Each structure stands twice: as C-alpha cells, then as structure tokens.
Image: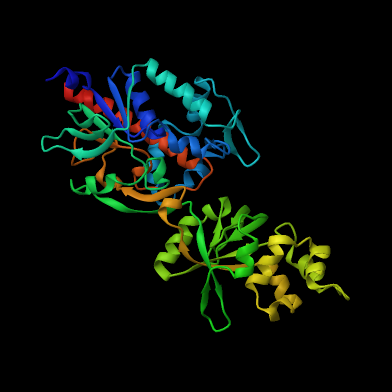
Amino acid sequence: MSSSERSLAGVHVIGAGPAGLMAAETLAEAGCTVHVHDAMPSAGRKFLLAGKGGLNLTHAEPLGAFLSRYGARRAQLEPLLAQFGPQALRDWAHGLGIWTFVGTSGRVFPDEMKAAPLLRAWMHRLREAGVRFHMRHRWTGWTSAGALCFETPQGPLAVAADATVLALGGASWPRLGSDGAWQPLLEARGIPVAPLRPANCGFDVARPQPDGTLLPGWSEHFRSRFPGQPLKSVALSLPDGGAAAPRQGEFVITATGVEGSLIYAHAAALRDAIEAQGRASFLLDLLPARAPEQVGREVAHPRGSRSLSSHLQSRLGLAGVKAALLWELLPREAMADPARLAGAIKRLPLTLVAARPVTEAISTAGGVRFEALDGQLMLRDLPGVFCAGEMLDWEAPTGGYLLTACFASGRAAGLGVRRWLAGQRA
C-alpha cells in the first residue's frame, strides 16, 4: 500500500451536504478516520442557497403531524426521526452556538436567519474532530476490485474504503452539485432506483375554453404584467380532497404558471395527477376570511355607474393580481353573473398541465428504494455502502421537513457504519 493510499484509509463520505456532513460527524464522534468528498469547490452549496432568504431548519408542530408530512414513506423515516427529530436538531444547532426561534407558522429558524453562520461553525467543529475534506472530487463509481473512483484536479484517484456513505442529493439545482449522475452508477450495480421526479416545484397552467379544450399558459396580457406577483392570504384545496380543510398561505405567479409554498404543499398530489391523467386542478379561495354568503351579498350589491373592477375593489378589496386572475380564468358571462362570480371568488379552478423540470425544483422525489436498504441504511447488495439524504426515495413539502429528514438519515447512516465496522472487527 502506498503512502497516499494509507493516508486515505478510513470511512469515505461522498457528498458534503447536510446528510453527508451529519454522517461524517457521527463517525468522527466514534473516533473513525473520516474523509468527505464533494464535486463542488466548497461544502454545503445547496444548503447555503436554501438558507439565503431565511434558513427553515425544522418545524415545531406536534410530532404526529410532523411525521404525516412524509406521506407514503412515513414508515421508513419515522425510526430515523425517532433518533434525531426536530427537537434533537434544534439542540444540535444550539450546541454549535446557533440559537433558534419558532416563527408564527411553526417553522424553526436560526436567530440570525442565515445558513452561513451555522455551516461555518459546523465545518470548524468537523475539522477540529479530524474530518478531512476533499473538494472537486467527483465520484465516478467503483473499480473492478471495489475501490472508489474519483475524478480530481490532480487526475483519477482510486480509494479502498473501510466503508462508504453516499449522500449525493437528488437532481434539483444541479449547478450546486446535485445532478443525479449517481443514478446510472448504482443501477449498473443492480441497485433499484425509483426515477427522479420534481418535488416542491412549480407548474405550468392551461386555460379551459368553452369547447373543453385547453390553451397552454397565460394570455399575453396576463403574462406580460403579473409574473413575480404574489397571491397573498389565499386558500387552496384539491377537488377530491374530501373533508380536508383548505390550506391557507400564498404563492407566486410565474411566466408559465404558479409556484411557491402553498403550491409546494400540494405538489406531490398535483404532479401525480398530471402523470396519471395529463392534467390536475385545484380550487382557489381568493378571500378565505370572508364567508360565501358575505361575498355573494357584496358582489350582488348595486354598483351603479362604477365598473366591475372598481366595484370588486371597493366592496371586497379585490384588486391587482387577484382581480386579474378572475378576468383571466372566467368567461365574460360568468364575470357578468353575480352568483357565478361570487362562487368563483371562493372556488376559482386552476388547471395545471405540467410540473416544471426537475432541474428547477427545490427537491426531488424518487431515488434509492428503501427495499434495497437494510434497517441501518446499508445497501443489501453492497455491504459496507450506506445511503443517506435526498438520494433516498422519499419526499416532503418545504417547512423544515426536508432538512430534518436529511440530517436524520445522515445520522442514521453514520450510526449504521459504526455498527457494521464493529461487527467486521469482532
């Protein structure tokens, strides 16, 4: 063994996002020699950008409600979150000197709001613990003998690892390092991977016509005036949502459709409906604080010589993008009918025909199937190789759920490596 090979002995973590860094910290705590590789020039690129407008670290809602956000993968994620859940994540941040607070929506943020102070403190602690970082190291698979292969600024590198943690992210925001290039590498080794799909994404709209056809996108008038405009204090519900209460919040008009937190909360259901039926729809309440009867009375109130737009603004405060959306989506005869107009203000249907590309999404669904992993997040067919983070087959809405599960899975993978190594040495 060469001196360079001896210097790289130990556990190798591939991916320097939250999941990979948490796995590295968990391993370093046990005295393991840890190497972290990442294709980017510095660690946590996506983490930093996600926290640029305010790092939503986790959520303070009751644990049962919190776990429900993981949908079909709740059963797989619940054991991980039991070991390292929302409160444990806050306590961990406090241990770095990063204090947190709970916002009015229940979302948890660092006091300084930003991701950079937390990442700086974390990286300092990791380096102090002996974790070695190898940046601009792009993982390209394995040699025939099972060594890890990397493309590096110094040329190709092969490393025989004691164990490996793959924390390579999904395929969203590829310019920050999560490009999904790992997918064919694992599939070539027989690892089942669910296709990567956009999650927490925007959608393209279509406008139904009287004959039942759909016109793609907004009208030229609407598209030229309203992209970037937020619809605030609205409520969204799905037509087949049953007794589920409409969710209140806000979202943003884009050049091709809609995006934003209220859309992301329903993105999985909307995406799945489009994949199954070619379209999806939701119902928008433009005035959730007003009862339908009140809206009906105000719309029907005599308006005299005032225009309908002036009437809606003076009686209901409907103006700007909210009023424009009514004109955009309703036929003229509906705008002229007080009963139909009042009904649309409380239940305005929007039709969606496509999710935005995965490269534009905040996160991805799909990834390494949990059936390919044991309870320690080790690949059953590749002993000593563990997976963590967004590259696993799960999804969750924004609100701190994504980050919390990434941290928790990184912690679980690190613990899994420790147990596996202990068994190998016994």
The structure residue drawn at horizontal position 41% and vertical position 40%, both measured from the top left corner, is 176
Outermost residue on the bottom side: it is: 211
Which colour assignment does the render follow?
rainbow
Q: How many marks?
A: 0
Q: Residue at x 14, y 37 (%)?
A: 143
Q: Position of residue 404 (x, y in %)?
A: 46, 37
Q: Quadrant of the N terminus?
A: top left
Q: How far across and down, in percent of the image, does residue 206 sit? A: 53, 70
Q: Quadrant of residue 296?
A: bottom right
Above or below residue 371? Residue 319 is: below
State whether residue 155 is above or below residue 306. above
Query: Which quadrant of the view contains residue 195?
Result: bottom left
Q: Residue at x 59, y 32 (%)?
A: 113
Q: Is residue 168 left or right of residue 207?
A: left
Where residue 292 sits, quadrant-wise, is: bottom right
Is residue 342 something that shows in the picture? yes
Quadrant location, the C terminus:
top left
Examine the rendering and report whether any part of residue 426 can be seen: no
